[in-house]
Amino acid sequence: MKLLVSACLLGARCRYDGASKEHPLAGALAEAHELVPVCPEQLGGLPTPRPPAERRGDRVVTGAGAGVTEQYRRGAEEALRLCRVLGCEAAVLKERSPSCGCGEIYDGTFSGRLTAGDGVTASLLLDSGVPVYGESQIAELLK
């Protein structure tokens, strides 16, 4: 299966803080499936590193209150375009991210609290019929 995957899970240093979040099962995932790494924030034009951001309803804002919604939307649209053009059947995304989080994201107060919801990219992919998995579900994809 061809999978769209958050690049940070594969070791790319593209997170807001310039780090990666390489997943210990990423190598096994790459052996079992064809992976297409993406970072929607970078695709949307945001630099790395960049200020942390969280979703507040339909908006995405930094801790200082700057709006970055347009960049997140543009990155989500590019990720969906790549998914379609390259024939990805599903996506494996970084959990809790304002872009990639699926099912649970930070609540927009920058307090570390989580709330039910999806990131901008995860939401667009799901609305477009693309199955989305979080990194905690990688083991299931390897079965």
Image: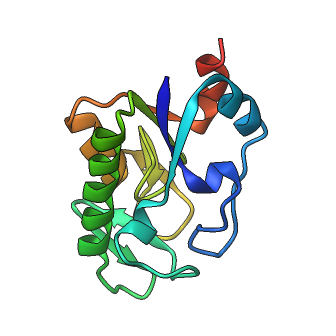
Give the answer, above or below, for where 16 lies relative to 122: below
Residue 109, image quadrant: bottom left
Q: Going 72% across and 51% down the picture, which residue do you hit?
A: 22
In screen coordinates, is 9 left or right of 129? Answer: right
Give the answer, above or below, for where 117 lies relative to 51: above
**In the rendered view, how is the structure colored?**
rainbow
Q: Position of residue 101 (x, y in %)?
A: 45, 47
Q: Position of residue 80 (x, y in %)?
A: 29, 47
Q: Position of residue 111 (x, y in %)?
A: 54, 67
Give the answer, above or below, for where 63 lies relative to 142: below
Q: Going 63% across and 28% down the picture, which residue do you hit?
A: 138
Give the answer, above or below, for where 7 lies relative to 103: below
Q: Residue furthest front?
A: 86
In screen coordinates, is 93 left or right of 122? Answer: right
Total count of labels: 0
Q: Residue furthest top?
A: 143
Q: Going 67% across and 49% down the picture, which residue do you hit?
A: 10
Q: Position of residue 103 (x, y in %)?
A: 41, 38
Q: Going 54% across and 48% down the picture, which residue do you hit?
A: 94
Question: Between 20 and 109, which is closer to the camera in this rendering?
Answer: 20
Question: Between 42 and 63, which is closer to the camera in this rendering?
Answer: 42
In screen coordinates, is 42 left or right of 120? Answer: right
Quarter of the figure that contains the C terminus: top right
